[in-house]
Amino acid sequence: MFEVLEKRELNEQVTLLKIAAPFVAKKAEPGQFIIFRIDEEGERVPLTIADFDREAGTVTIIFQKVGKSTVRLGAMNVGDALKDFVGPLGVASHFGGEVKKAAIIGGGLGTAIAYPQAKKLHSLGVDVTSICGFRNKDLIILEDEMNAVSDKLIITTDDGSNGNQGFVTTALENEITGGAAFDLVIAIGPLIMMKFVSQLTKKYGIKTIVSMNPIMVDGTGMCGGCRVTVGGETKFACVDGPDFDGHQIDFDEAMRRSQMYKSQEKQSLEDHQCKIGLGKGEN
Amino acid sequence: MAKANMTPLKTKMPEQEPLVRARNFNEVTLGYTEEMAVFEAGRCLECKNQPCVSGCPVGVQIPQFIALVKEGKFIEGYQKIVETNALPAICGRVCPQEEQCEAHCVRGIKDEPVGIGRLERFVADYAIANGGVATPEIKKNGIKVAVVGSGPAGLACAGDLAKAGYSVTIFEAFHTAGGVLQYGIPEFRLPKKLVSTEIDTLKKLGVEIMTNMVIGKVLTLDEIKEMGYQAIFVGTGAGLPVFMKIPGENLNGVFSANEFLTRINLMKAYKFPAYDTPLGQYKKVAVVGGGNVAMDAARSALRLGAEKVSIVYRRSEKEMPARNEEIEHAKEEGVEMILLANPTRILGSEDGWVNGMEVVKMELGEPDASGRRRPQAKPGSEYILDVDAVVVAIGQTPNPLIKKTTAGLATQSWGGIIAEDGTGATNLPGIFAGGDAVTGAATVILAMGAGKDAAAAIDAYIKQKG
Ligand SMILES: Cc1cc2nc3c(=O)[nH]c(=O)nc-3n(C[C@H](O)[C@H](O)[C@H](O)COP(=O)(O)OP(=O)(O)OC[C@H]3O[C@@H](n4cnc5c(N)ncnc54)[C@H](O)[C@@H]3O)c2cc1C
Ligand SMILES: Cc1cc2nc3c(=O)[nH]c(=O)nc-3n(C[C@H](O)[C@H](O)[C@H](O)COP(=O)(O)OP(=O)(O)OC[C@H]3O[C@@H](n4cnc5c(N)ncnc54)[C@H](O)[C@@H]3O)c2cc1C
Ligand code: SF4
Ligand code: SF4
Ligand code: FES
């Protein structure tokens, strides 16, 4: 069993948990993920390792409550324990030595997934510009953490409620045309955002890494459910990724595949909300 | 010996009615009654040269155990089997007996062979139900040995090592032990309760099972050695799915058999939404392949409520590698066999869902290396099947994780670990391997046999090391 040691609500949808998982903490690197299962009836759900502490044997996860499993995970409290927590899975991000100036783009919750990468690059002495986009100012997460690992931090909101209206792509293009010579862009967030960032950076010829989060079952290369098309070839995101060259990804296929269980997911969540006495919440 | 029962046919095993069972996940076959078992045992001639034994990869003492069944000594019969086979309840159900023990039975020359598998299953079920499964006294020697993977190879290896006194730890990637027995072979053919009973028996022998341990990621083989394990057995199976590499394979509704069966068996998608893992409702399912995996996927699809399920296989029924019984059962349940046909592309709707599969007709040419006649496409014979889901069951190869993270481990070009026949020794000292990880996808009993051989070799290796 894997105990919850710390819990923080980052906004009304996003929760941070620190979990006791010494084996995972020992090996974890930025870019890798875990798979958890709450209990015997639970599904296997992948989440990025947002942070880790090898000495303390802890792993931090940050997640958005979008469906039954993440809602249930969000309802866990300090002292509760998860049945399964396996990792680190996936290939660690490797930043080819030559990077001098990087842009880290986080879309919403993607900011949490991008944070360990920003932290790592910063610690390697890379000049980091972080651009994080949220729907509105109440949804902004990890502002202090991102600030601490960025030479420049830009936060945009779709509705402008933080005083900086716009999309991350606009902010990124402004930086580029303003003279920022990025040699690497890391974009993590909704597929549609990663697609547009990749289109933009392709135009400017900047190497771009995206983090693919397809539906997964085992996370060890056994089921092939997580397949994505990269440069015309089928790859398994759990073992070949989750990081890939954004200019090579078939995003349209990835978007279609992410819809595969939409109706069952909805049923699962509604079922759960009925059982715990909530109305049909929105999601 | 009493006069033999010369009934020509094998005693039939009761089973659920085809059209009833095709809609539930309960076990299809119900097993012999005591009377049936004794009657069937009577068909055995107790041949002195015991040809049947030579067909069993682990050398079960077939005439001896059957003689005990004749006398109604079922528990003793069980004990006779477990001298060489630790998992009789499982093997009795899933061994391809018609190619192994029963293929060599002299009764099979004129009539049907003795139902060795059915008798094996009967005594094992009887022993489990009647408390006949004893835990032997073990003298611990305090030496640690690690087993990676908890499929039949790993379980058999761990069991024998534990009985020899070793402190055995199994490292399993999944959250549940059992390998293919757990996530591949469906409930209606191998009840999961049986698999957990067998695993509990191992735990009673003192075997420790650590789940959630993806070796190569969480720990490497070198790190396991550093933890004080004197030898390691690698029984990681052949889990990497093979796809057809045809257009449309990434459409929504196309699954590897591994994904399809794992969602159903391991994650219990057939109990959705009580269990959280979904699978989806498909009406017309095509399963590509002709082995046990294909039959299991097809029959599972029926049970999930599909209206029409077809097996698409590029050779004829005679060449199908699946067990005869599974092919028969599948047909009885209404699975359609589309033979001598090979998929060429999968068609999809605008929003990315499968809505058809194009196949080309095949004909059989000259025999290939495997001795089976090689199928060739008949150009221009393409036609389209009306399907909304496709399950690809054309084979699996070993997962490259261990190979990638173990410096110097010798492997075949297709990924199998190279291990010595009869011992499982790899080119690295103290590292042994067996089962599907070495042979590629094979059978439960061969994997078990490899695990047992390796256990004996590990014992010898450690003793010689001193
Ligand atoms: C490698 C990897 C790393 C991930 N890291 C994180 C993370 O750090 N934090 C986090 O909040 N989420 C992360 N995700 C996504 C997370 O796994 C899904 O949000 C989760 O599976 C939803 O489960 P659920 O039962 O709560 O919702 P479900 O009921 O399964 O789904 C609810 C909604 O979420 C969408 N969804 C389902 N699965 C995914 C998925 N894999 N990716 C994106 N959307 C999905 C569905 O389409 C649906 O709209 C990651 C996914 C992967 C594959
Ligand atoms: C659907 C299906 C039906 C079948 N039907 C039959 C049948 O009727 N009769 C028959 O004889 N055979 C059948 N087989 C074949 C048979 O199941 C296999 O040959 C047998 O299970 C192989 O045993 P194994 O121990 O080598 O590997 P597996 O059973 O595959 O077990 C390997 C185990 O290792 C674990 N593992 C893998 N990698 C790692 C890692 N890196 N770290 C830790 N653990 C790891 C896996 O999770 C798994 O639990 C069938 C197979 C399938 C898929
Ligand atoms: S283990 Fe398999 S092959 Fe051997 S006797 Fe039993 S059923 Fe036959
Ligand atoms: S060959 Fe057949 S009849 Fe002879 S001992 Fe074996 S099972 Fe009995
Ligand atoms: S999640 Fe199963 S292969 Fe990637």
Image: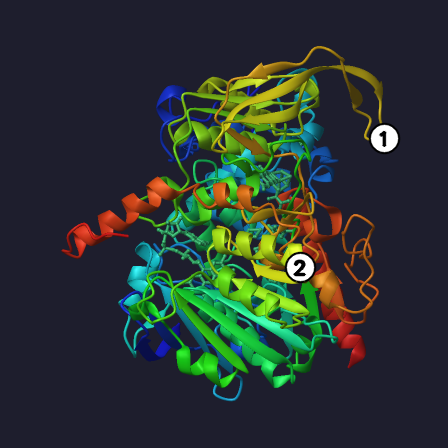
Q: Which residue is mark 2?
A: A204
Q: Which residue is mark 1?
A: B369
Residue closest to the eye, B117 or B266? B266
- Amino acid type of the residue tagged 2 in the rendering: Tyr
Q: Quadrant of ligand 3?
A: top right
Image point (50%, 22%), residue name? B387
When asked about the image quadrant of residue A26, the answer is bottom right
Q: Is residue A240 above or below residue A114?
A: above
Q: Is residue B160 above or below residue B153?
A: below
Residue closest to the eye, B425 or B408? B408
Image position, residue B459 (x, y; %): 72, 69
- Amino acid type of the residue tagged 1 in the rendering: Ala
Marks 1 and 2 in Cβ contact (< 8 Å): no
Side of B81 where B440 appears, left or right? right
Judge whether residue A265 can be spotted in this image.
yes
The image quadrant where one finds the N terminus of chain A is bottom left
Image position, residue B446 (x, y; %): 68, 46
Image position, residue B118 (x, y; %): 52, 33
Q: Residues within 10 Å of mark 2 (few under 14, many from 20)?
A: few
Image point (65%, 42%), residue name? B443
Mark 2 and ligand 1: say if the CB distance to the nearest ligand atom is below 8 Å.
Answer: no
Residue closest to the eye, B117 or B409? B409
* In this view, the mark in front (1 or 2): 2
Element on which disc 1 rests = loop
Q: Is residue B195 above or below residue B374?
A: below
Kindly give the residue lying farthest to the bottom in the view shown. Answer: A55
